[in-house]
């Protein structure tokens, strides 16, 4: 009797719990339907406001937004012709074992050092000489590259052109190294200038991968210049040409352009989150359909704040993106946030690390520009300047400001060397320890 009573009580308790759970889930589902309906209306209003600012929200609008300016030269077809062969397996096979361009390559030998593989490097440059000529011709047009990208594919849009660009930048750096070894400083400078011109022509491509690739290609050139500047007798005219190309990079503008494009590409995913095309595969993305507009609305709100923040000084941009990342994680954690904001939580945190990439790129650009300015001052005055202020305005347009703390770049002149540096992404002044790669400080040193 007692056992039967316990069983009845247990069943009744279980039934009561299940009933409460069902009521809670049902109430949440009904409230979700109402919130989804309201969010759909809010979403349409938000999209209309974005359009009023002249910003794109659909693939078609993004295509119009990226349409070439009639006054500019579209160099994409020229670079495409020059780089098409460099993206093929034949080039990879030819380049294997050659510094900068190939797999299994040895450490580079800088001017003044023995370079046993120089003959093989020269043979490679000769074989791809027509491609190098095309790269130089396209670079010297000082245009913009407008690639035809299928934005309707969202985040799976093909960016196959970038593979050839990576190979082209490395090949140009190899050309610079050979020229430096053969005491042809003008040709070395011209090759590095071509890398910078290539990367600058990509500034308006509205895809984050394209912009981070552009940053990476500039780093390739920066690191080569870090080694070549103290070893090669570049003419002052060539150094000023390098400065001119460096100053054309606007990383605030290119980050903003990338965010405007990424907003559209991710909205494409919101429209069909069950799957997106990636090559020949369809890759599932987690989704809560009844909350999709609520999710999209939160995504747009955070994107709005981040896009606006890009116009601020870099420390403020970093702070805002960090806070946005933290807020997204909070909003999307636990029930019901983990169901409401699935896609927002999936995509937005990736933007936080991108800010550091762009800030480091800006710091490297400024340090290298200032290093060239310091050398030009030394040539004209017999010694390095006592401080950065002495370089303005004859050698620098303004006092360069460190992106990581918004203070002037550090400048140290001793009896042994002159060092110019940024404190780097850890935001700690380590006294100029590191190199142009930025570990821990991002610096360039002229030996005395």
Image (tube, grey):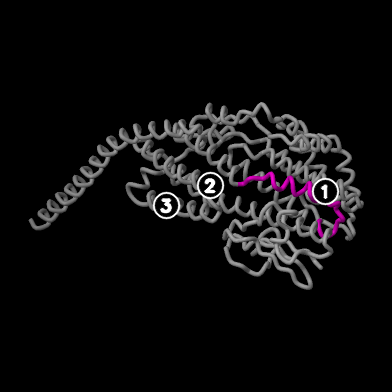
Name the disc covering residue 420, or none: none
Residue 227, how many percent across, how many down?
Answer: 79, 58
- Determine the residue positioned at 71% across, 56% down: 392
Rendered image quadrant of residue 155: top right
Assign the N terminus to one quadrant of the image. bottom left
Residue 116 at x, y = what percent? Answer: 90, 55
Q: Nearer the viewer, mark 1 or mark 3?
A: 1
- Residue 223 lies left or right of residue 324; in this view the side is right
Give the residue pinned by disc 2: 310
Tell me the distance, in whole angstroms, between the alpha carbons under discs 2 and 1.
33 Å
For the question of whether residue 372 can be seen, the reply is yes
Residue holding disc 3: 329
Labelled pair 2, 1 in contact (Cβ < 8 Å): no
* Residue 372 appears left or right of 158: right
Indicate the secondary structure of the residue bearing disc 3: helix
Residues rendered magenta in the picture = 229-251
For disc 1, the marked residue is 238
Residue for point 58% across, 66% down: 428
Q: Identify the element where label 1 is drawn.
A: helix
Please tell me which of labels 2 and 3 falls first in the chain: 2
Would residue 249 be counted in the magenta stretch? Answer: yes
Answer whether residue 101 is visible to the viewer in this image: no
| In the foreground, 383 or 295 | 383
Label 3: few (<14), some (14–19) or many (≥20) C-alpha neighbours in 10 Å: some
Mark toward the start of the polypeptide (1 vs 3) = 1
Give me the residue at 77% from left, 55% from top.
372
| SS of the residue under disc 2 | loop
Tell me if mark 1 has few (under 14), some (14-19) or many (20+) residues whose alpha carbon lies within 10 angstroms of its own: some
Foreground label between 2 and 3: 2
Q: Quadrant of the C terminus?
A: bottom right
């Amino acid at each position: 009797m007692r056992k039967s009573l316990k069983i009845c009580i247990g069943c009744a308790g279980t039934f009561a719990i299940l009933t409460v759970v069902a009521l809670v889930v049902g109430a949440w589902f009904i409230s979700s339907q109402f919130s989804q309906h309201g969010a759909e209306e809010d979403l349409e209003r938000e999209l209309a406001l974005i359009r009023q600012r002249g910003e794109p929200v659909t693939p078609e609008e993004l295509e119009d937004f990226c349409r070439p300016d009639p006054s500019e030269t579209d160099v994409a077809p020229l670079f495409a012709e020059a780089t098409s062969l460099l993206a093929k397996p034949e080039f990879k096979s030819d380049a294997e074992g050659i510094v900068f361009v190939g797999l299994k390559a040895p450490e580079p030998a800088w001017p003044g050092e023995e370079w046993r593989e120089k003959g093989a490097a020269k043979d490679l440059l000769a074989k791809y000489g027509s491609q190098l000529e095309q790269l130089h011709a396209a670079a010297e047009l000082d245009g913009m590259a407008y690639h035809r990208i299928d934005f309707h594919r969202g985040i799976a849009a093909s960016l196959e052109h970038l593979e050839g660009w990576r190979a082209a930048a490395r090949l140009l750096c190899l050309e610079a190294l050979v020229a430096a070894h053969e005491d042809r400083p003008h040709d070395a400078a011209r090759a590095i200038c071509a890398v910078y011109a290539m990367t600058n022509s990509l500034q308006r491509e509205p895809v984050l991968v394209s912009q981070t690739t552009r940053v990476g290609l500039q780093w390739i050139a920066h690191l080569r210049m870090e080694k070549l500047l103290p070893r090669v007798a570049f003419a002052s005219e060539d150094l000023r040409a390098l400065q001119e190309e460096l100053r054309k990079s606007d990383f605030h503008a290119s980050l903003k352009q990338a965010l405007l494009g990424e907003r559209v590409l991710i909205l494409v995913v919101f429209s069909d989150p069950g799957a997106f095309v990636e090559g020949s595969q369809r890759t599932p993305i987690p989704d809560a359909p009844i909350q999709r507009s609520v999710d999209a609305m939160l995504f747009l709100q955070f994107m709005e704040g981040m896009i606006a923040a890009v116009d601020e000084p870099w420390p403020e941009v970093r702070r805002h993106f960090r806070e946005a990342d933290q807020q997204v994680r909070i909003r999307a954690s636990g029930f019901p946030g983990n169901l409401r904001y699935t896609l927002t939580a999936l995509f937005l945190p990736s933007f936080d690390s991108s800010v550091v990439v762009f800030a480091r790129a800006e710091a490297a650009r400024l340090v290298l520009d200032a290093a060239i300015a310091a050398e030009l001052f030394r040539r004209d005055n017999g010694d390095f300047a006592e401080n950065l202020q002495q370089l303005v305005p004859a050698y620098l347009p303004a006092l360069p400001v460190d992106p990581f703390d918004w203070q002037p770049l550090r400048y140290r002149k001793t009896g042994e060397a002159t060092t110019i540096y940024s404190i780097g992404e850890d935001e700690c002044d380590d006294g100029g320890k590191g190199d142009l790669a930025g570990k821990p400080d991002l610096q360039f040193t002229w030996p005395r």
